[in-house]
Image: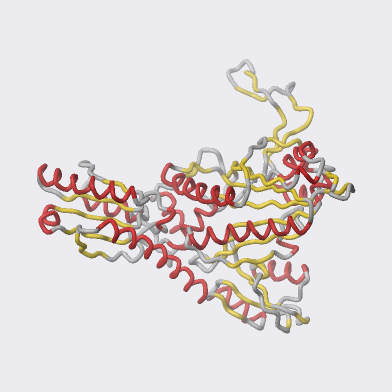
Amino acid sequence: MSKGITSRNEDYSQWYNDIVIKADLAEHSSVKGCMVIKPYGYSIWEKMQAVLDQKFKDTGHSNAYFPLFIPKSFFSKEASHVEGFATECAVVTHYRLKNDGNGNIIVDETAKLEEELIVRPTSETIIWNTYKGWIQSYRDLPILVNQWANVVRWEMRTRLFLRTTEFLWQEGHTAHATSEEAVAETKQMLDVYADFAENWMAVPVVKGVKTPNERFAGALDTYCIEALMQDGKALQAGTSHFLGQNFAKAFDVKFTNKEGKIEHVWASSWGVSTRLIGALIMAHSDDAGLVLPPKLAPIQVVIVPIYKTEEELKNISGFADELIAKLKRMGVSVKYDDRDTQRPGFKFAEYELKGVPIRIAVGGRDMENGTVEVARRDTREKQTVTQDGLEIYLVQLLEQIQENIYNKAATFRNEHITEVNSYDEFKELLDTKAGFIAAHWDGTPETEQKIKEETKATIRCVPLDNKLEDGICIYSGKPSKQRVLFARAY
């Protein structure tokens, strides 16, 4: 274990917190429930943003920005939406402070807003109120807009990255002329998220649809990607919602179609958040610290010189400069750590803790022999490698590490999808092996709710590639046509 990190097996929750804090990703803020994302943590988010932003643009979307504040009346227009978010809203009631004459700053009671403003928990209402002015005809459609923003959902129990009162995310909001187009958009964005999770984050996911109980407030269908963490709990890593015409009707957004008839617009919304950093940590890391897939690592290769004389350092630095130039031309991010304030052993532990995929150590004897020591973070293996063609070797090794991290997570996930046929077996498995449990369910919200109350397990999704099979609900004994995935979740 590194730098006093708690073992995963001893206390998984503390292990997670230790990594977030000690790897310099984030810390608790003096504002209750909020976090400070530190530069190293934010650089991971920036890498995620860059990839996702390009994927959104490649699928025809543009970025825009909408207000942080939403008039309270907007929320009451879509009943199920306001019901879903009412208990999480932060409300602005006044617009001025004043000095009370005793040196205390208090709210100026005369400066009460005519209408309270909600700090956005999500932006459907303000965006659909805006779209009303943008859409008159089928020629104005589709609108394919994404917003990078912060949102506020008042949380009583918080965990860094996984659940905080304020967090960062992107939210796509699209408007379409037909139901078919809106559904196609919803599914397309789910595929974008799944591709990003698997090919960049190296996290295998199950694509599925949520049950009515777990659906986004105001949606007709919620599609999701579900990932499995190393403690056997599921994490919802992204959602894409088919909103039907609910918000168009609530905000009276109509258009004239090609036949000259007036219709309400069809909608989708979709989003992922900084919670993905939590997923990255919990899916891959170990008792020595963070393990990052190379594609999202802020530093992919670190070079540490080991020297006794200034002459040795000069030779090593000359070699490092050449290697760095070659790697940068190949798109690899490299750091040369020649700080004389820390010993090599300290640096090794630091970069291991921070999850840097490849560490290169170069000493005086290495320079004589034309070699370097290469340590890979995923397996913690070291080997001596020749300096000739080193840049090509390193690029190939980064690809191998990315693949290995994914395969390890996929093996774990696949070994933790278990079919059960009885409620007793279901409950026992939740407390012993955990993971995804594939079980028959009678399709009723009542049964789903009872299972949740009794076991804290929820239906994570109905997998999109589900095979139909006749069976009996594990709880009610009623007929069932397919298994669904249950799990305890974050």
User: Residue 440 location, x and y as percent?
Assistant: 70, 78
Quarter of the image with the N terminus is bottom left
**In the rendered image, is residue 456 in sight?**
no
312 left or right of 193?
A: left
Give the farthest residue toward the top.
101
* Vertical arrangement, residue 265 with respect to residue 194, above or below: above
Please identify the quarter of the rendering in which residue 287 is found.
bottom left
Residue 171 in the image: above or below residue 214: above
User: In the rendering, at what x and y percent does residue 410 appear?
Assistant: 49, 70
Q: Viewer-proximal residue, 423 or 213?
A: 213
Measured from the top left, where is residue 223 in percent x and y?
67, 61
**Is residue 133 visible to us here?**
yes
Residue pictured at 73% horizontal, 39% vertical: 126
The residue located at (62%, 43%) in the rendering is 62
Give 102 or 473, whichever is nearer the viewer: 473
Front residue (pair 246, 438): 246
Q: Quadrant of residue 19?
A: bottom left
